[in-house]
Image (tube, helix red, strand yellow):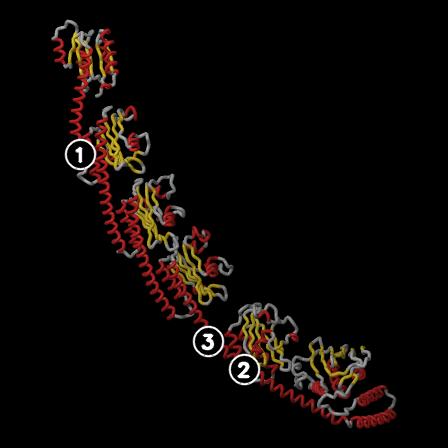
Amino acid sequence: MTDAAVRVLLVDDEESLRQPLASWLSREYGYTVEMAGSGLEALNCLATQPTCFDVVLLDYLLPPPYTGLTLMEEIKHRCSEAKTAFIIFTGWGLDPQVGVNALKAGAYRYLAKPFDREELAILIQSIVETRRTRAELEATSREKAWLESLFEVSQLVNSTLKLDKVLDLILDVLKQVVAYDSATLQHITPEGLQVVACRGFPEPRQLIGRVFPPSEAYPNYRVWQSKQTRIETDMQVTYQTQRVRGWLGVPLLYRGEAIGVITLDSQTPDFYDKDNARLATIFANQAAVAIENARLFSETQRRLDDLDKIHQASRVIVSHLDVHQVLKEVITLTADVVGSDNTSVVLVDEMGRLVDSVETFSAAYQNVPPLHERARPNGKTRQVLTSGEPFIATRVDETGDHNPYLLEIGIASYIGLPLKAKRKVVGVLFAHSFVPNVFSMERIALLTTFANQAAVAIENARLYDREFRRAETLRALLRVQQEVTRNITTQSKVLLDKIAYTACQVTGADCAVIYPYLAETNKYDLANLAAFGLYGELTHQDKQRLAQGGGVSSLVLREGRFIIYDAAQDDPHLLQHSFIKRERIEAFVGIRLEATTPVGILFVSYRRPHAWAEDELALIDLFAGQAAVAIFNARLFGRTNEKLAQKVTELHTVGEINRHITATLDLDEMLPLILNKAMELVNVTNGMLQLVDETTDELVVRLCHGPLLIPLEQTRLKLGEGITGRAALEKRSLIVPDVTQLPWREIYREFRPNIRSELAVPLLIGSQCLGVLNFEHTRPGYFNEDQAEIIEALANQAAIAIQNAQRYNELAQTKGNLDAAEAVAWIGLFGSSWAHSVTQKTAAARNYLAVLADHLPPNEEAQNLLSKVEEVLRAIQEINPITQPLPDKPRLTTKLDLDTALQEQVPRWCRASPQVKLVLDLRCPGLRTHIDKEWLDVAMEKLINNALRVMPAGGQLKVSTRPRRGQVEIQVIDTGDGLPDKVRPYFLEKQVPREFTSGSGIGVLIAKIIFRAFGGSLELLWSGRQRGTALQIILPASPATGAHPIVR
């Protein structure tokens, strides 16, 4: 109490005394003086004051109804708690006993009127000093008691390091220092001030955990924010509370930071004062230290416990080698370590795809999809996987980007931790809580340590699982390989069924299908389709789209591999595929089966989304390799059997052909037999047999089957020219897969339309090439080594037979040439005596005819006969005699005017065939040739007569000459029926067999010998039905004399 704080109430009915005295006390001593003229006024004034007065000056005699003593009693009654001092004024002339009675009634002093003002002032000052001294003594005593209580309380609070017990003790012991009706201890959290202990409330359990959000609307938040104690005199007035009136809030300060608040409630207004606040603050400081010590101890103890849990958990999880068992242990131990309500763990493969998950959701949430299925592409799971950093959700509500399933099951907060093994994220560990903001940074750090241990355990289990599966796979593959190598048949279905079954067993797939493929026909081997795990039978209709290039199978054949992890996301159209829809397939891998060429497709499928790992795909590749080997071996076995059978057939055929071609020496009969049988062996319709013309080093087509784009006469090829020419030159077989591709298109000669592949096999006798067997096909790559080999065997036999036939023909030709040469020799031998004998004999015949004509009667028929005989005799006389034999070599001294000689003789030779039109086109006027006229006449007459003999009436014979450089060219062209096919090979080479024609052909051979003797040649230009025959003679010539050509 200070002087300025002294409040005085002056009650006296004498205004003359009351007013001056009040003014003097206020002026001189600074007292606050209130005045009243009666007892009622005094009581009314008291009622308007917030507190009672320190000193009351009372006149003993007051107007009724109160006297000074009765008014003192009333005031004392109303201010029972206050220490109000009373001084009684006694009136003039009153008995002194009145003053004594006043003292007995409780007055501090009494003064008789009139009194000295100074004396009154001294009395008031004495009261003030006495009261101040008493208050200080009481305060000291009280503070001593408080300090003793605080010491005891501090010892009591610090007697334990268990946080829960410390929190309870703080409020219990605080009541010994500062009274309260109810109290709370609140700890600051990120969400606000959370009630951690309470006393005096009807439902404490409902209050524990309540959080007061940061808002100045709450006085406790103001205390925490300002770090200052706060007294509220009446909460009903300020905050409209129902139960609380007086309120005291004290901050819990630790090292200058507010860690919480203590609130004390009273149902009495203005219950707490500064002393209460000071004591509560001192206590709160001690309590804050105790709380922090307990918290640190508890945290340390919990950390030690957690580390022990982690150690024990690590021992547990590393003791398992089954991945799913490890995952179950991880989520169970996670709940123990951090106290989560639900725990999830999801794994990723080497490509970062979610492959598996395990969770601890109760049965109430059994409809929630697994985490690896419900995880969103841009959700928190993917965020943790990508960043490799933890994610903390302190409060889960609709305003945040959280998985809808978490909201559905009531998750309020969660954390997601990356599972890292060797700096690689292998999964995510989630801990969920139904309480907001439950996971502290310490919890997260602790769980991170456990997550790392879990990641190592998971990777170890995965490694063991991979190695175990690899070992199982190798054993399975070994069994399959033994089956493949032991049971080789043409039917591969049994083995392929086993491979499909084993692939599913090793990989855990739901089904597998193997489609053997025939690349050469672009079709599937429907008889050997294999499958395992299908709902329905595999039908041929399942493989109908390949020919059109559509479907997944065609894509696999082109690309080699096709992987679908989740058909609904990767390619929803696949789900409409009849087979995939029927089998409910959602993930699959298709692998092309390779054995030098594609031999099939292996599909391994799941009826759920599946993340294919690289090692898993490697295993399937091994099974694909075994399937390819099984298919290849079966086909190789089948082809080998077919080839053996084909070889037997081919060897039998070659033997038959050999027997036939060696049974005849007639080349015209032999060549068709060789070509026809060879075409049967290679199964073609386009074939050609060419023989080498040794005089020109050209290949000449002797026999041809199939259409030609050019005339047969234009198919001659030089050795080395074209594919057959190169085969003949290089003396080796040539297989041309595609004549339109390099290097073949540069040398290919197109004789037939639409040809793509070709086989040319030379006919060889030692190092000599007699010709080439040539076969062509419209399909690229038709011919192969096997076909070439069997045709070579045939060609070797055919070459021997052809050579024998050629030698025989050469002998026959030699014989024909000898016959012709002998005839020519006889012509020369008798030529010298021809003119004399013929002239003599014809003269005698004419004499006889003249005598006969004189003796015969006139008769027309007889005269006609005589005329014909005369013509015969004249023709005989016109025959030029041979004056000298054929020369051994051309005589250049002989110079015959060719056009003149032909102009004279040809019309004469044609006189006997007036039905034939003669055309002379002689364009070598004055050009002289080195041949004797009589030999020219012999040779030309035989050629002219042969032509006239084969031409019907109306035919035409054309004889023409053309100059060449140093030579002259004669052509004899008739319009007859041409040479018969059987005669053509003999023409100009040898005598023609009698069964083929009426003539022997020796006349043509004589003409050929004559022309050759004079340095010339005779050759056939062409011959054919409706074309006639054209012969060409070449003779050496001298320069022309300048005469004009003869044309008629």
Please name the residue shown 37% across and 43% down the image.
402
Q: CA distance from mark 1 to mark 2?
A: 128 Å
- Say what amino acid the circle numbered 3 marks: Leu
Which circle's residue, 2 or 3, is located before the other in the chain?
3
Marks 1 and 2 in Cβ contact (< 8 Å):
no
Task: Using the image, determine if residue 396 lies above or below residue 39.
Answer: below
Q: Position of residue 321 (x, y in %)?
A: 29, 57
Which circle's residue, 1 or 2, is located before the other in the chain?
1
Select label 1 or label 2 by which is in front: 1
Q: Position of residue 88 (x, y in %)?
A: 17, 11
Give the image quarter of residue 698.
bottom right
Q: Position of residue 256 (x, y in %)?
A: 27, 36
Decide which of 254, 894 is in the foreground and name it: 254
Please name the residue shown 24% across and 12% down the image.
24
Q: CA distance from mark 3 to mark 1?
A: 110 Å
- Say what amino acid the circle numbered 1 marks: Val
Q: Residue furthest top?
A: 93
Q: Which residue is mark 1?
A: 153
Marks 2 and 3 in Cβ contact (< 8 Å):
no
Q: Which residue is mark 2?
A: 797
Q: Which residue is mark 3?
A: 644
Q: Is residue 541 visible?
A: no
Dot 2: few (<14), some (14–19), or many (≥20) neighbours within 10 Å? many
Q: CA distance from mark 2 to mark 3?
A: 21 Å
Q: Is residue 252 visible?
A: yes
Give the tally of numbered discs.
3
